[in-house]
Image (cartoon, helix red, strand yellow):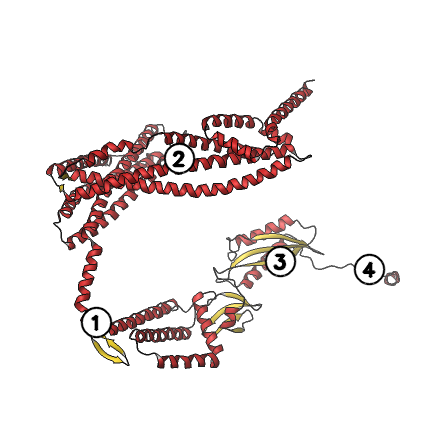
Amino acid sequence: MGKIRPMPIKCFSFLIISFMLTIIFAGLSSAETLADIKREFLEYQSQPLERVKTLRYEILKIQGLEDGLARQYGIPVSQVINYEMMLEHNIEVYHSIYFLQKQGTAPSQFILEEGRLEELAQKEPPYSFLLYLDIIEDLENYSNESDRYRRVIENAKSSLLRNTDERTEAEKKFRLLNDRLSRPGSNSLNDSWSMMEISAKLEQCTAVSNLYNTTISLAERELEDTEGKLGILKPLLERVRQKIRFSNEDFALLNSVVMEKTKYLYENISQLEKKLDPGFGHIDDPSELSQFTRFWISNEKQLIRDEILMNLEILEKLTSLRSVWRGMQDLLEGNLDIARQKYILSKTDDYIDDINSNITQCVDAIQNIRETEQAVKRRFGGDSPLMTESDGAKKVGFLNNLALSKRRYLSYLVDLGMIRSQYMDLQKESARISGIHDTEEKLGFFWGSSITRIKETELWHVDEYPITVGKLSFALMIFLIGIAVTRYFAYSFRKRTADGLTMSRHSSLLIQKFIYYTGVIISTFFGLWSLHIPMTAFAFLGGAIAIAVGFGAQKYTGDIFSGIILLFQKKVRIGDEVIISDRRGVVEEITLQNTVVKCEQSNHLIIPNSKVLDGAILNLTLNNSFTRTEVSLSVAYGTDIEKAMSLIREILSKDRNVLKSPPFKILFENFGESSIDLTAQFFVDIKENLERDVKSSIRQKILAAFNSENIVIPFPQAEIRLKDDTRQTEEK
C-alpha cells in the first residue's frame, strides 16, 4: 500500500498545475486587439510602481510552474526562464521611469547654483585672482555638463530608433499569433504562451520608448539650463580678466593649501620609510619563513617603494604650482613677450603629459593592489596549508595596509587632477593671450612683403612664360624631393632583397635601376611642369615610347610588370612550396620575366610572370612552412583497431619531424574489400624536412611496429571457384 500512495499526490499536483496554467492563459486566449494592448501598456507608464508589483507577482507565479510547464505541456524550462528574465527587465525599466518622473517633477539640479551665480555677477572690480580661478573652474564644469547632456540626448535618440524597429517586429508577431489563436483547432496552450512572451516584449518596447522620451525631455531641459549658466559665466570671465587684481592674500591662501598637502605627503613618506626598516620581516634563517610571509614581505616592500616614488612625484608637481600662478599673473598683466609666451605654452604641454603619466601610474597601482588582495584571499584563504598559525595576524594587517594604500592612491588621483586642472588653465590662457595663429599670420605677411621682389625677379623666359627665381626655386625643390623619395624607395628595396631570399641579385639590381630612373624622369617632368615650360617635345617623345611599348614589347613589359607586382605582393616568394598546373615544387628564382620552380623530379618549371599573376597558384607556405600530409594504410579484418591506432599515435607523437601543433589525427577511413583502411594525418615543416622523407620514415616505423605486434597488413584477395570436372581431374 505504501508504494502506491505517491500516485494520487502526483496526479493531484498535475491537476493544480493545470488549474493554475488555465488561470494564467485564460486572459490571453481571448482575442485582444493590438490597440487594446497598446492602450493598456500606456496606462502602466503613469503608475510604474504599481506595475512593478504585478510583474513581481507574475514572476513568482511562473517560477512555481517551471517544471510543470516542461513536463506536462512540453514548454522548455529555458524558455520559461527567458520569459521571467524579460519580466525582470521590464521591472528595471519601470523603476527607471519612476525615478525619471520624480526628477521631472523636481526643479532643475542647477537652481541651487543660482545664488552663487548672482553673487559672482554682483562682484565689483578689482577682481581677486581666486575669483578668477573659481570662474574658470565653474566654466569648465558647466561646459563638461553641457557636453554630457548632448551625448545623453544623442544616445537616447539612437536607442529610441532601435527600439522602434524592435516594437514593429513584435507587433507583427502579435498580429500573427492573435490570428492563429482565433482559428479553430489551434494549439492554444503553446500559442498562448508565445502570446505571453510577445506581450511582454511589447510592454518592454512601450516602456523603453517612454523611458527614452522622458530622458530626452529632461536632458534637453538640463542642457538649456546649463547653456544659460554658460551664457552668464563667459561674459563674466571676460570682465574679470580685464580688471583682475593680484593680491598677496590670494597667493598666501593658495600657498597655504599647497603647504598643507605638502606636509601631509612628507609625513606619509616618513611613515612609509619606517616600514622599509632593515629589520622589516628579518629572520636569521630565511628557510624558516612560511610561504605567506615570503609573499607578504616581497609584495609589501615593493608596494611601499612604489608609493614613496608616487609621493615624491606629487610633491614635485605641487611645488611647481607657484610658477603656474605667477605665470598666469604675468600673462594677464601683459609682462611677457611672444617668445616667452610660446615657451610657457610648450613647457605647460610637457607638464600636462607628465601629470597624465602619473595618473596612469596611480590607476595601475590601484589595480595592482586589487590583484594582490585577490591573490591573498585566493592563495591564503581559509585553512590554507601555505600559512602557519602566526600568519593570521600578519594577513589581517597586510590586507588592512592594502586597503589604506588603495585609499591613499585615490587621494593622489584627486591631487593630480587638481594640479592638472590648474596647468590646463594656464595652457588655455597662454594659448589665448599669445595669439599664436595671429602671430604666425603677421610673421607670414612680414616675410612675404620682404622677399616678394626677389621671388618675382625674372631670370629668362621660354616663349611667353617667364622663369623667375621663385619658379626656379620651386621646381628645384620638387626635383630634389623627387630624387630623395626615389633614393629612399631604391634603398628600401635593396635592404629588403639583400638576403637573397626574395629574388636573385641580378633581378634586384635591375629593379633598383628601374625605380631610380623612373623616379628621375617623373621628378624632371614635374619640375619642368612647375616652370610652365611647353611640354610639346616631351609629349611627342612620350607618345613615341608608348607606341613602341604597346606594339613591340607588350608581352615583355607585361611579364616585367607582373614580376614587379609579384615581388611586392609577396604572394609567391623564393623558397615557397607551391602547386602550379598540377606540378608541385619549390620556388627557386623570381626574375623580371619568369618564375623558376624546382619540381620533385629535380627538373625545373619556368613560368612567365604574367601567367603566375593571372593563374591559380596553391602556395603551401604563404603564412608558414607547415603543410599537412597523410599516410594511408590497411589492416586485416579481425585486427584490434584500437591497438593499431594506439601504435600509430605513439609513433607520431615520438617522431621529431611530426609537428605537435597543429595536432595530428588518426582516422578510421573505410571498410575495404579485403581490409580496414586507416589514415594518419599530420603536419610537417617543409623548411626543415622533405615531405616524402618524413612519410617514408613514418611508414617504416609503422611496418616495424605492426610486425612486432603481429598485426597483418593484408593484400587483395579473391575467391576462385572451379568447375566439377576440373576439380575431379585435380583429385585424380
Q: Position of residue 602 (x, y in %)?
A: 54, 72
Mark 2 surroundings within 10 Å by alpha-carbon count, few (fewer than 14), some (14 through 19), many (20 or more) = few
* Of callouts 3 and 1, the N-terminal one: 1
Amino acid, disc 1? Lys
Q: Position of residue 72 (x, y in %)?
A: 64, 30
Mark 3 falls on what kind of element?
Answer: strand
Mark whose residue sits in front, 3 or 4 = 3
In this figure, which residue is indicated by the disc labeled 1? 455
Q: Which image quadrant is residue 265 in?
A: top left
Circle nearer the N terminus (2, 1): 2
Q: Which residue is mark 2?
A: 379
Q: Which residue is mark 3?
A: 632
Q: Dot 4: within a 10 Å radius of its alpha carbon, few (fewer than 14), some, or many (20 or more) residues? A: few
Write down the quadrant of residue 10 in the picture: top right
Q: CA separation, marks 4 and 1?
A: 110 Å
Splitting the image into 4 quarters, where does residue 675 fall? Answer: bottom right
Q: Earlier in the sequence, mark 4 or mark 1?
A: 1
